[in-house]
Image (cartoon, coloured by chain):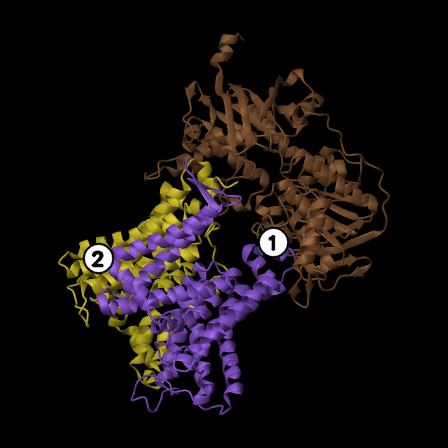
Chain colours: A purple, B brown, C yellow
Amino acid sequence: MRLETVANPSLARTLGFPLIALAATVVLGSLLAMLAGADPFATLGLIVRGAAGSQFALLETLNRATPLIFTGLAVAVAFRARLWNIGAEAQLYAGAILTVLLGTGALEWPSAALWPVMAGAAMLAGALVLLGPAVLKVRFGVDEVVTTLLFNFVVLLFVSMLLEGPMKDPMGMGWPQSPRLIAEARLPRIVDGLRLHWGFALAIIAALIVWVIEARTTLGYEMRAVGLNRQAAEFAGIPVGRVILKTALLSGGLAALAGFSEVAGLKGNLTLDISPGFGYTGIIVAMLALLNPLGVVVSAIFVAGVFVGADSMSRAAGVPTYIADIMLATALLTMVLAIALTRFRVRWG
Amino acid sequence: MSDEQRAQDVVLRLDGITKRFGALTANDAVSLTLHRGEVVALLGENGAGKTTLMNILFGHYTADEGSVELFGQPLPPGNPRAALAAGVGMVHQHFTLADNLSVMENILLGTRPLWKIGFDRAAARARIVQLARDFGLAVVPEHRVGNLSVGERQRVEILKALYRDARILILDEPTAVLTPQETDALFATLRKMVAQGLSVVFISHKLHEVMAISSRVAVLRHGKLVGEVATSQTDRRQLADLMVGAEVSPPELRPASPGPALLTLKAVSTADHGNAPGLKALDLALHAGQITGLAGVSGNGQSALADLIGGLERPLSGALVLHGETARQWSPRAAMAAGIARIPEDRHKTGTIADFNLTENAILERYAQAPFAHRGWMDWRAARDFAARVIERYDVRCPGPETRIRLLSGGNMQKLILGRAMEDAPRIILANQPVRGLDIGAISFVHGELLAARDRGAAILLISEDLDEIMALSDVIHVIYEGRLSPAFARGTASASDLGGWMAGHGFGGGAHAA
Amino acid sequence: MAEIIDILLSTSFWAAVIRIASPLIFATLGELICERAGVLNLGIEGIMVAGAFAGWMTVYSGGGLWTGVAIAMAAGMLFGLLHGTLTVPFSLSQHVVGLGITLLATSATYFAYRLALPEVDTPPRIEAFERSAIPFLSDLPVVGHALFTQTPLTYLAFALVVVVSLVLYRTPLGLALRAAGESPSAVAAQGLSVTGIRMGAVIVGSGLMAVGGAFLTMSAFNSFFFEMVNGRGWICIALVVFGAWMPGKALLGAVLFGIFDGLQIRLQQTELGADVPYQVFLMMPFLLSILALVVMSRRASVPAALMVTFNKGER
């Protein structure tokens, strides 16, 4: 078998394969539900209702989407320049640490001054966490996939150390958790009484900014060139190493905003389980969005919906929540295959 | 020999082979026979369908119509092993060798059933040595292929075929990368093979070589077999006419009027990169209004010199003098700022970004300057205008500036690269293998542009492995060997065989003959 | 310092080193086979999780120990088949597919675990492989007891290093596999199927990764719990680089890693360990792996066609 380039894919081709991929994911979900002894249609219905069936559900989904938009953007930006940042998890925690460090009383400033400083410091921390692997890649040619993955474990252990040591909440009854943020440091809700905080708005703004950077700036052009053909970029005089480092700073900073937003917007303090793998899920979000920053918003909401819906379904129908992770991993694999099939035609023989 | 005898002698018969790719008919009812103990030359320019025909023989493609017969047996289509098993060996233009494996490992690859264990290495080695001796193909089985010269690699490729008892050997453009002396050695090997009853298909577009080695010539044009003649009954003129379909006229040359040196290298050395030698205290001056040709066997420092002038590599020692001033900071951007236009060796890997459209590719070397960028913001309208200008002036055939460049033919891709480099009427032009793989129309277009630039007063460095191209276009010729440069030969003062001697390292003195 | 020397001289320490190294040897060999054929398999972490569960579950449901190993291997090969299909003939990004396989294998395992044992808080233990001493050899001083009083799976791991070396360097299959990772066009020119060779390598390699995971549940912890693989797969990828893609050196790397990991576990229990947070010790294996990557990346000879897709018909 071999693949031939399709010069001008038809609309049917462009839409058909991704739709088949989604359908395959849903079918697999149904099969899993049956395996768990539940009615597949009822299960899927419960997932949809749990994700978007009520105002509460919808806002819960948007809340869950917020960190995913940030990590999705972080991954999308990095993958665009073919910087394999699998360390969004670590960068998220780095951002969370700085948020706690500055937001628990170290700076007793009014909110308008405190928020940008906290967010900026968080971004800086996340950027620096990714700068390490990026420098190793540019200077020594060390594969960043493995280093960013390994850094996730190091940073998580570091957080654990902080939460059992210097950053431990004295009032926490022995639990490994940080003190709570002061009131001025908390991100308020967008609408009073509704559980959606300003972190979500910040995420949308971030997506817009990233979109503008990619489409309209020389940095965006450079990132795309480096990602598509590093050798040609080098020949054309694009400072490849510097572009990769800039990309790393941007990507790490975006992932760190997820930590900032979760701590300052949703949770109010830092615990070890603040991220149930948002960094890794960001990869799914980014790939489903075809690395498009605006698409990331949509796919993050979709992915969050699956998680929130599966949580609620699991309580009602008893199907393990891991069904959501399986369906999303499947969506990731079928979607990359579908995208390839829109661009290439399979020939046998 | 009677006709009947000759019919029994047929080892390969291609009968009415037709292969279409969409609207393109790559092979149109091509029939060809090969007899025992003869060399048939398959002549045709790039894109004439030679490679497609061989890919059908080797089962990589399935023919839409027609059949293949080997030693009287029909060959099942679409099975890559069938031709090999029947005793056909192929030496591809781009060698199919694994650099990190030894000569012996490369030869043995695929010669035994994969699941077999237990093996007489000594016997296999002895057989390789014996074959090498019989056919004049000196190699050391233990050497790593990555460390071998181009000529040695070709010998390994031929040994690969002989080791599996090939009775038919197909050579695709085998002399493109050889010195004239190495070509003579190859021809000697081929004659020994033919004398032992092997048959050879020699694919080439070089007329004098076809005349020298073949007994029969088959000419392909636009996928059709347009002529088949006995070599003794024809001449170069007739073959050229058959190949191109019209008389070929060599590029018209006006006498050069050289001006001052625009770029001078003074005892420049650069770092080695693995097996690729760097420059060794090299002196070179590129004069305005003159084409300087750089001949040499590939892998002798051409890349190092191109990388240096292109800004990708910095001198370790020595000086690079531009327009009378020594360059301090050296980078691709500095090179372009100094007015150096660059045509890279590999248009797919370094010249263009396949998934960028024509607009994005057109501004690749100048995206950060006005009018395409202001304070970090792109002006896509200016970029599209520029691309449209290049497309029009350089006759780039494409659906439009928004087309991804991977969909263009090599010739049109090269025209875009040429156009974006030449748009500012550059004073210095670095043309590295500018016509490799192009068809005759595109070749004469590129050569015409280079000659026009010369007449306008540009200093041009033309790097090519094709000695004929160098000799046709250059006003002065240098030969590069292991990072060192021969003296300059003015047009007409050195013959091909003189230059071939230099290409093989003769005349450089001081340990140059280590190999 | 004296504490460290005491540790290094104890037989139980060396036994622990070998126990730590064994699962890594399986998985590292698996990854090495994939990469030698030209495919980076980032599914390793998830495949180890799946293997750990499959082996343990088989034994828990009454199957034999070796049946458990076989089932684990089969589970790994199944994920290998998926990985190979997507990355080899379809030429999809090996990074994305590998991570996707890790997510899929991990979540599918946890789903299956929850289905099988819905109400269980502490996972049950199984009768795992027992240690058996090899006569004479186990009587050698210091290392004898450590090396030769291990479970059969450990012996299998060490035997596999020899087998994989022999296959890679002494058989036509190994030559074809290495060539597929160095120059796929050379393989195709000889009429061999690059797709077939690479698929086979990924499937077999994934099977070995799963056995590495099964070692954890069947020869070390004797039980299955979440997060038990805990980055070991990623460490194995670093070990392949450290071992310069050679089985023998990779074994050396795994044992060295075992020494450092065993040492940090013991040091936690000394006076030094009381002063330093335990997390610092736990970080060491990961930091060491990163360090190993940095040091080795300069000299290691990467297979030339690693992550280079091969599609004969693209035009």
Q: Nearer the viewer, residue B394 or C96?
A: B394
Quadrant containing the C terminus of chain B in the rendered view: top right
Q: Position of residue B490 (x, y in %)?
A: 81, 40
Residue A3's spot in the image, x, y percent?
Answer: 46, 42
Q: As shown in the figure, which amino acid type bears the numbered disc 2?
A: Leu
The disc, 2 or 1, on the residue closer to the chain's N-terminal end is 2
| Residue positioned 42% across, 66% down in the render | A300
Q: Is residue A89 left or right of residue C74?
A: right
Q: Amino acid at mark 1?
A: Ala
Q: Confirm whether residue B433 shows in the render.
A: no
Give the foreground label among 2 and 1: 2
Residue beneath disc 1: A232
A255 vs B357, nearest the viewer: B357
Q: Is the same chain shared between marks 2 and 1?
A: yes
The chain containing the residue under callout 2 comes to A
> Foreground residue, A133 or C173?
A133
Neighbourhood count class around disc 1 (C-alpha, 10 Å): few under 14, some 14–19, many 20 upward: many
- Does residue B175 appear left or right of residue B471 in this picture? left
Q: Which mark is residue A38?
A: none
Residue bearing the label numbered 2: A35
Expressed as whole percent of the image width and height from the top left, the position of residue B503 reads 68, 40
